[in-house]
Amino acid sequence: MQTPRLKIGTRSSALALAQAEETRTRLMAAHGLSEADVEIVPMSTQGDRIQDRSLSEIGGKGLFTQEIEDALLQGRIDIAVHSTKDMPTVLPEGLHLSTYLEREDPRDAFVGKTSAKLTDLPQGATVGSSSLRRQAQIRHIRPDLNVITFRGNVNSRLRKLEEGQVDGTFLAFAGLKRLGLEHVVTELMDTERFLPAPGQGAITIESRVNDALIDALLKPLNHEETFVRLACERAFLARLDGSCRTPIAGLAEVKDGRVSFAGMILTPDGSRLHRVAIEGAAADASALGTEAAERIRAEAGSDFFTSWA
């Protein structure tokens, strides 16, 4: 048996494996490799193992990446494939997000059991979500609803919905598409009304800094427009917080060499909301994200993030 030349680290969920498989397929096509040349290494993370509490309670996004990043730093894997929205803005020294595959549809999808649309749910209905951002936006739109923490992978959340534990839930449309589950969506949320998480819908590849061989292998996979969009969104996230403890939303679009960005911060109960919009040259994407964060922080006031912490 031929020894794999490249090892891809990933979480072991069905969605994570689908994303790693997409990355492997692209690497094979770009370099004429066979499946034997590229091995997918599924790994269990603390975030996957702890399902009874919200991420904000147990430590945030890093719980989905630590074991994988340790393996990357130790050379047990060569690259790591992640959902960009799950990535902290501060990475371990020696690692970086070097590559973004072309972004899928970033919208949130509502999957309703008792009603097809969020606004049509009966008074006091229960909606489940593990995301503070989604919870806050749901409460802003429908303050009468009972919003509960709803952890688990895509299939387990859909099963809980079918069992009647909740009347509806939200999932990333991109993830449902990658799993061939678009048919379960009952409402696609307009980004004007329901803004996605920074990075939602984009697969990113994490690698070691200054690894020339890996950089050369990954270069053909990088999608420049997605890279620019994510530079803006992650700069916005980094300047504000970037953990799972604050409801932050943001989406950048690129057209004709210019970036337009919309961002939002909310209190967890959805009662206070601030928006920002900014536009500028694509070359300044990161600076624009930072400026947007400064503007929205100034509008919200210095006490916004501490008044409810």
Image (tube, grey):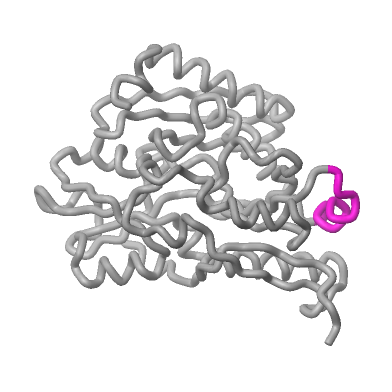
Q: Residue furthest left?
A: 123
Looking at the image, which is closer to me, 191 or 234?
234
Coordinates of residue 162 in the picture (x, y in percent): 25, 71
Quadrant that contains the C terminus: top left
Looking at the image, which is closer to me, 78 or 158?
78
Left or right for 256, reference 14? right
The range drawn in magenta is: 210-220
Coordinates of residue 103 in the picture (x, y in percent): 61, 51
Q: Residue furthest bottom?
A: 1
Hey, which quadrant is residue 282 in on the image? Answer: top right
Task: Determine whether 152 is above or below 195 in the image.
Answer: below
Report the predominant secondary structure element of the magenta stretch: helix
Residue at left 10%, top 49%? 124
Task: Determine whether 248 is above or below 152 in the image.
Answer: above
Residue at left 41%, top 65%? 154
Left or right for 56, reference 76? left
Residue at left 18%, top 52%? 120
Quadrant that contains the N terminus: bottom right
Hey, which quadrant is residue 283 in on the image? Answer: top right
State yes or no: residue 214 in magenta.
yes
Residue at left 41%, top 51%? 108
State yes or no: residue 299 in magenta.
no
Coordinates of residue 55 in the picture (x, y in percent): 40, 47
Coordinates of residue 40 in the picture (x, y in percent): 68, 71
Left or right for 71, reference 169? right
